[in-house]
Amino acid sequence: MMKNASNGQASRLRPYLTTAQLISLAAFASPIISLLFVLFRLRASSDVAQQSVNEAKSSLQASCLAAERAASVGASLPRYLAQGVNEQITDGVRATMEGVRIGLTLSLTATEALIEFCIDLYRSTFLCLLELVIRGGLSVLIASVSEITSFVNNTLSSITSGIAGDIQSANNAIQAAVNV
């Protein structure tokens, strides 16, 4: 129950959402949804990385087969053998490096998303704590001002009635002296 500051009456206002409802909505919080998007992106990108690795593997296998064929003809065509092998090795290295680049990019993206999630979690907790402190402080301040006002009003009322009584006694004494 909260006390109304204007007239001192208690009100029965409750929060719009209860704790159970807030907990059930936690799954739809923006940091969790963002984390799901990051996981989806990570999964989609891992398929691309796997395809790149498979392509590099098949390219490397193809270069090995070409090297076998060229070795049989190698005595007559050493120049063509060297060109084919060099091109296949270059393509394999490039594809492997591209796969590594994609993997590292995905790792950085996931790490960045996790760091952003942690920062947002700490920021939200700090804001909640700050709001609790401010609302609690205001509640204590309002209650103390109400108590002080009540005390001052009661004290002034008793002083006023005491002074009025003393004035009435003085008037009675003066009236009695005049009447004698």
Image (tube, rainbow, N blue to C red):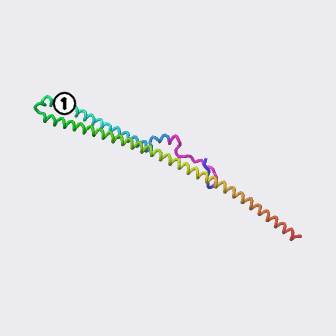
Q: Position of residue 126 (x, y in %)?
A: 50, 47
- Residue 60, above or below 159: above
Describe residue 16's horizontal placement relative to residue 56 as left or right. Answer: right
Task: Provide residue 75's location: percent of width, then percent of height.
Answer: 11, 30
Residue that mark 1 sits on = 65
What residue appears at the point 27 percent right and 39 percent down from the top-left corner? 97
State the SS at label 1: helix
Q: Is residue 41 above or below residue 135?
A: above
Three-letter residue code for mark 1:
Leu
Q: Which residues are magenta?
A: 7-22
Quick check: is 138 in the magenta stretch?
no
Toward the left, the furthest residue is 76
Q: What kind of secondary structure does the magenta stretch mostly adopt?
A: loop
Residue at left offset 53%, top offset 42% = 19
Of 71 and 114, the residue lying toward us: 71
From the viewer's side, name the closer residue of 7 and 97: 97
Residue 53 is left or right of residue 67, and the answer is right
In the figure, residue 62 lies in which quadrant?
A: top left
Q: Position of residue 108 (x, y in %)?
A: 36, 42
Magenta segment includes 17 = yes
Which residue: 64% across, 53% down?
Answer: 144
Q: How many numbered discs, if any?
A: 1
